[in-house]
Image (cartoon, helix red, strand yellow):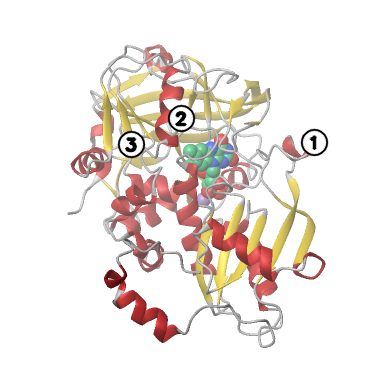
Amino acid sequence: MGFSGLREFIELLDREGELARVRVPVDLDQELGAVCVTSLRGRGPALLFERPGGKDIPIFINALASRKRYALAMQCDQQEVHREWNRRVSQPLPPVPVDSGPCHEVILQGDDINILELPAPRLNSLDGGAFLTLCCHHTRDPVAGFRNVGIYRNQVHGPRTLGILSGPYTNFMLQHRKAPTEPFPIAIAIGVDPRLVMAASCPFPFGVDELAMAGALRGKPFEVVQCKSVPLLVPADAELVLEGYLKPDEKQEEGPFGEFTGHYGGLKMPRPTIHVTALTRRKNPILHLAYQGAPPHETDVLTAVGKESEILRNISLAGVKAVHLTEGGCGVFHVVVAIDKLYEGYGKMVGLAVFGSPSGRHIKQVTVVDDDVDPFDPAAVEWAVATRVQPHRDIEIMNGLTGIFLDPSLPKEEQEGPARTSKILIDATRYDAKSFPPVCLPAREMMAKVEKDWEQYGIGKPTGNKH
Ligand SMILES: Cc1cc2nc3c(=O)[nH]c(=O)nc-3n(C[C@H](O)[C@H](O)[C@H](O)COP(=O)(O)O)c2cc1C
Ligand SMILES: [Mn+2]
């Protein structure tokens, strides 16, 4: 049961019982945010607000905030997602240009553009204004010409102006810095096939075209149309497109904004402005957003799964069995890697390789465990750290690595500047594995026999705990 595009994905979620429609009007000032938080805490479904702020442009939000829904978007079993990602992205499918598409049903230019008419919410109480949070920024390298697609927050400043906050290490900024004084053309597509959102939030190496990766993820190239006022291509079936130019010399106060870390990040300061030269859209567009705040939230899944897959794909060391970017780590900061430890010292080698991979860019803590530990089970991981780690021997702290400027623990000058951080590697594999005391458990055959005959004991459902 395949699907194509955002609308068919919403229908699929509905059929699977993974969508709730909010029919009552909901205030854009924090009420929508509070409904999102409460629903996320209860592991709720994706939400379609039908009348946000009393307006008739619906908001679709929390779409990929569960691994089950992510697997639905990948159209495979939850256990197969990493393998499927890696199988599919090994053959990128570049987009195909077409003459027209639904994203051009309405074309507004000049004074007809009014972004303020969109139901952009103010999610959390200290947010400096209304923000769009799931905008796929399409750009072209000013020198080499290749495309980049990435997601960066956009504050709504006025009818034709937006703020943008993109970290100094993003591929977006690497492109922009090649022609730093020129107006930088941008096409922001909102409401696209979820596979493009998945690719656009993944830190692929510089030069990788996320649209081609997204085409590979869905097994069908995207159709793209020429923008009306900038020399860029966008997905033809996008709900809405904001075209414009980033003017580096025209700064406006941007922020503060409650970030995926659960804290305020990217504090209020002058940041570049995007001047919107065209707004094109469907006749009845849907505004696709992501709630930002403390976990659990969409970032825990959306940005985690792609990076887990990329780490598995990029690390050339053998024996890496499973990778998990944790929920408490906001899907960004903490990764647990389960390995078959090939020889002594191998745990630290794998940890360093994770930090050195493109998807390790923002990771602050790597915990390496033996493959008898399930990296997706927080108690099992803590057990490994508690029982197999001698801190002076098995923990390494490194300084001056690239972090994420939204990390609230960084000193202010690093949050506003280069975002250098220290990082911690915990090697929780058995030290000197041959002589390490064995794990205690009845014999494997006895465990298997008891599991087979379980019902006869009249105890009820087994707990499923591996240890
Ligand atoms: C919902 C959401 C919001 C995001 N907001 C930002 C942001 O405001 N600034 C930023 O630098 N990265 C943000 N990211 C992360 C980037 O999209 C991610 O690092 C991506 O890999 C950047 O792509 P690039 O390296 O090709 O530029 C966000 C991701 C998601 C899923
Ligand atoms: Mn990129």
Question: Which residue occupies the foreground of this view, 327 or 357?
Answer: 327
Residue 46: which numbered mark, if any?
A: 3
Q: Residues within 10 Å of mark 3 (few under 14, many from 20)?
A: many
Q: Which residue has dot 2 on it?
A: 37
User: Is label 1 in a helix, a strand or a loop?
Assistant: helix
Q: On screen, 381 above or below 64?
A: below
Q: Report whether the residue tagged 3 is closer than 8 Å to ligand 1.
A: no
Other residues around mark 1 within 10 Å, as few (<14) / some (14–19) / many (≥20): few
Q: Position of residue 289 (x, y in %)?
A: 41, 32
For the point 18% across and 42% down, which residue is it?
Answer: 15
Q: Foreground: 26 or 312?
A: 26
Which residue occupies the foreground of this view, 221 or 438?
438
Instruction: List x then y, in percent, for residue 296.
Output: 49, 40
Residue at mark 1: 413
- Which quadrant is home to the N terminus? bottom left
The Cα–Cα distance between marks 3 and 1, rounded to whole angstroms, is 37 Å
Toward the viewer: 303 or 31?
31
Q: CA distance from mark 2 to mark 3?
A: 12 Å
